[in-house]
Image (cartoon, rainbow, N blue to C red):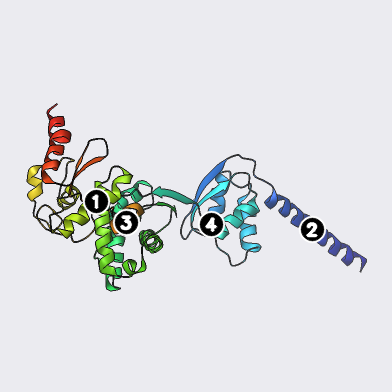
Amino acid sequence: MKKLTGVLLVLVLGAGAAYALFEIGVTQPGAGEGYLMFEARRGESTRSVARRLEEEGAIHSATLFEIEARGLHRGSQVKAGEYRIARELSTRQVVALLLSGKTFARPVTIREGLTVAEVALEMEKAGFMSAVDFRAAAARLAEKIKSGGLSTGSLEGYLFPDTYYFPKSITPMAAVQVMVDNFRQKVAEALPGEVVEDPENLHKLVTLASIIEKETGAGFERPIISSVFHNRLKKRMLLQSDPTVIYSLPFFDGNIRKKDLSYDSPYNTYRYRGLPPGPIANPGLESLVAAWRPAETDYLYFVSKNNGEHHFSKTLAEHNRAVLTFQIKRNRK
């Protein structure tokens, strides 16, 4: 009996010592400084993750990582994604991070006035996905939204310009949906309900806002430029906006030519009255508000002063003099 008791005591003491050593191992802080960007691959085993973490010097022991992950967090799995791991973290803290799924979010800034194709390129440059996949997701979501009542077959104009924070593993559809949801939230906060809740009126407003966005070099001019277009629409005048022509061209090298103004497209506002069929870019909130609330002016024309601002005119004669001053004479120098 005494021998059996001694054996049990040895076993208990041995188990206790083993547990104590385990606790020391998994709670020991990392010896490194700074951060490690680590990507747990989709479908990757816990063992594979542990080995790679040990190779990267993020943990002391792959074995201890496995025991902690499998034994103390039974049923949990390492979540796929990119993680920013502080090298001072203990193995237990690293396990908790990778089981939590709190992946690192990378920033991407979508500037005002970009088209859907240009937004797609920004997403590709930021390393989230290919531009082709982003455009395909935008097209699929546009069809889904159209069937739900939104007056558009494209998301041009509805991908809200902003700085977004996405995990590297975000899907194209999820990214597009976030941008559209952001658009809906922002316009609901800034515009009256009768505009937001009427798909056709909202579509016209976004279309006008996109033209204002592309015409504006100085932010304070947005309501004034809006007033010019509102005034021309009321008088059934052609909008004659160069950016709409550029949007319609199959190829644009940076210089708009006289022949381009006759290009046959419903987006060419030199040929067709009224607004084009849809937005020509994704406008920011200031342009959306300006489209809804233009300044009160009698202006019908504007021309660039070549400094980011415009000269506004009420008559064609005044406008022609401004063109002579700011464009023709300048180009002759």
Q: Distance between the residues labelled 2 and 4?
A: 33 Å
At label 1, which amino acid type do we have?
Thr
**What is the C-alpha distance between the residues marked 1 and 4?**
52 Å
Q: Residue at (89%, 66%) from the top-left corner?
A: 5
- Residue 288 shows which numbered tag? 3
The first of marks 3 and 4 along the sequence is 4
Q: Is mark 3 on a helix, strand or loop?
A: helix
Dot 1, how many residues are within 10 Å of its Cα: few (below 14), some (14-19), or many (20+)?
A: some
> What amino acid is labelled 2 in the image?
Gly
Q: Which of marks 2 and 4 is in front?
A: 4
State the quadrant of the C terminus.
top left
Depicted 146 relative to depicted 308: above or below = below
In front of the other: label 2 or label 1?
1
Which dot, 1 or 3, sits closer to the camera?
1
Mark 1–mark 3 Cα distance, whole angstroms, equals 18 Å
Q: How far apart are marks 2 and 1 (CA)?
A: 85 Å
Sequence-first disc among 2 and 1: 2
User: Could you tell whether 154 is left or right of 68 in the image?
Assistant: left
Work out whether residue 67 or residue 88 is closer to the camera in this orientation and state it: 88
State the quadrant of the N terminus. Answer: bottom right
**Measured along the vertical axis of the image, is residue 204 above or below residue 262?**
below
Query: What number is the disc on residue 16?
Result: 2
- Tell which circle, 2 or 4, labels the residue nearer the N-terminal end: 2
Residue name at image x 58 percent, y 55 percent: 97
> In the visual, does 197 lie left or right of 30?
left
Residue position marked by numbered label 4 in the rendering? 102
Disc 4 residue crowd, few under 14, some 14–19, many 20+, Cα 10 Å: some
C-alpha span from label 2 to label 3: 68 Å
Q: Answer whether residue 53 is visible to the viewer in this image.
A: yes
The kind of secondary structure element at disc 2 is helix
Badge 3 amino acid:
Leu
